[in-house]
Image (cartoon, grey):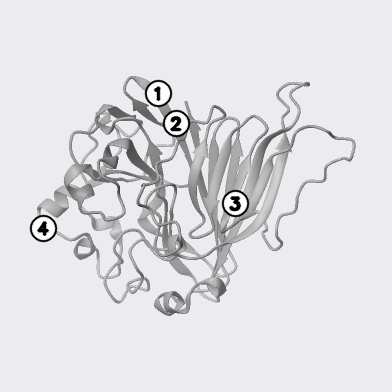
């Protein structure tokens, strides 16, 4: 793992180098980066939530609700919120995470911007300028509100790296244990992809993966937390055999795909490829769209906006990952807009 004992520093630039550089802004609780070729990313320090990612032509790739609260008062509805250290409703007592709010503390805490690193293009001798920029953000147990640390008194450090390049967006999370004993966690990158019409979306790459159908479980009046083992282990959740079919949408879908194969996941909007997702270490994938009825009950989602996004979320949620004292765990994803 990469040693994060010190904040990252900028790569030195020769005074004679007049190549265009990535533009970085850190104002009003937001960090933005724009490449010379036009690609753009914006990160809210509240939750280190990515709230915009645009192609060079200005096309937005992430959905953020028109009613999302971006003032730090609650988790953002949209973008890429970070789920840590628990996924969904917390497990029952006596699990260590049982007192935490849904989806944990990372997405509702204020992160620190650590700095940026940029790299020059090497694809052609005459291209010049930055072809990528990496933004680093940090959160530690000392930075979190006391009520949350009371609920989960673990000594931790998180480093979240957001890399914007001409091919796409990369996000990776490092989880460090600064305590004296091993502890367990779940993690998920809750990515809201912007699409034209959910009814036309097809997802490829999960056909052979078993999944838990959370909508079906709710229909049987079985709360997810009551399906857990006494120690909060999610491995006993009922799993459906692989469907062998691509995923399409004509009603609410909320599925946890367990231990998906390593190949890319492709999102088609209509008949056109729209996104490709490649995961690193993150074995599980959550696919979600609330559809009309559930969306109507969400006070932070604009009317009819459920049609314009699909969540394809890379994570580690089938089991509780463990990190030993002094050790670091790392996982991430790469998303390409096609």
Q: Name the element at disc 4.
A: loop
Quarter holding the N terminus is: bottom right
Q: Residues within 10 Å of mark 4 (few under 14, many from 20)?
A: few
Disc sitting over residue 273 in the figure: 1
Q: Which residue is mark 2?
A: 276
Disc sitting over residue 55 in the figure: none
Which quarter of the picture shows residue 178?
bottom right
Q: Which residue is mark 4?
A: 221
Seen in the image, is 69 located left or right of residue 122? left
Work out how far the residue at label 3 is from the one at label 1, CA to CA, in angstroms: 29 Å
Q: Earlier in the sequence, mark 3 or mark 2?
A: 3
Q: Name the element at disc 3.
A: strand
Q: Which residue is mark 3?
A: 31
Q: Nearer the viewer, residue 69 or 107?
A: 69
Q: Nearer the viewer, residue 139 or 178?
A: 139
Q: Earlier in the sequence, mark 3 or mark 1?
A: 3
Work out how far the residue at label 3 is from the one at label 2, CA to CA, in angstroms: 25 Å
Closer to viewer: mark 1 or mark 4: 1
For the residues bearing labels 3 and 2, Cβ distance under 8 angstroms: no
Q: Residues within 10 Å of mark 3 (few under 14, many from 20)?
A: many
Residue at image location 38% in from the left, 53% down from the top: 68
């Amino acid at each position: 793992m990469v040693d994060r004992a010190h904040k990252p520093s900028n790569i030195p630039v020769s005074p004679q180098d007049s190549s265009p550089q990535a533009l970085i802004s850190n104002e009003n609780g937001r960090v933005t980066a724009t490449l010379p070729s036009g690609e753009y990313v914006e990160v809210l320090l509240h939750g280190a939530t990515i709230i915009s990612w645009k192609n060079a032509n200005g096309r937005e790739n992430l959905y953020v609700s028109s009613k999302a609260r971006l003032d730090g008062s609650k988790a953002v509805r949209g973008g890429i919120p970070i789920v840590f250290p628990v996924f969904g409703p917390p497990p029952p007592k006596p699990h260590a995470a049982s007192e935490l709010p849904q989806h944990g503390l990372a997405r509702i805490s204020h992160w620190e911007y650590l700095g940026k690193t940029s790299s020059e293009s090497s694809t052609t001798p005459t291209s010049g300028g930055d072809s990528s920029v990496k933004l680093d953000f940090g959160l530690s147990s000392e930075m979190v509100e006391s009520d949350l640390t009371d609920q989960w008194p673990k000594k931790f450090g998180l480093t979240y790296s957001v890399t914007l390049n001409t091919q796409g967006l990369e996000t990776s999370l490092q989880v460090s244990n600064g305590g004296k004993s091993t502890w367990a966690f779940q993690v998920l990158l809750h990515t809201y992809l912007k699409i034209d019409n959910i009814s036309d979306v097809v997802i490829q790459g999960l056909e052979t993966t078993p999944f838990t159908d959370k909508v079906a479980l709710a229909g049987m009046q079985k709360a997810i937390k009551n399906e857990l083992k006494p120690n909060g282990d999610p491995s006993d959740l009922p799993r459906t055999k692989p469907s062998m079919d691509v995923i399409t949408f004509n009603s609410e879908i909320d599925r946890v795909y367990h231990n998906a194969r390593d190949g890319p996941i492709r999102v088609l909007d209509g008949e056109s490829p729209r996104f490709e997702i490649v995961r690193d270490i993150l074995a599980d994938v959550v696919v979600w769209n609330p559809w009309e009825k559930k969306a109507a009950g969400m006070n932070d989602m604009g009317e009819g906006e459920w049609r314009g996004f699909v969540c394809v979320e890379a994570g580690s949620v089938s089991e509780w990952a463990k990190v030993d004292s002094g050790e670091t765990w790392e996982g991430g994803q790469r998303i390409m807009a096609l």
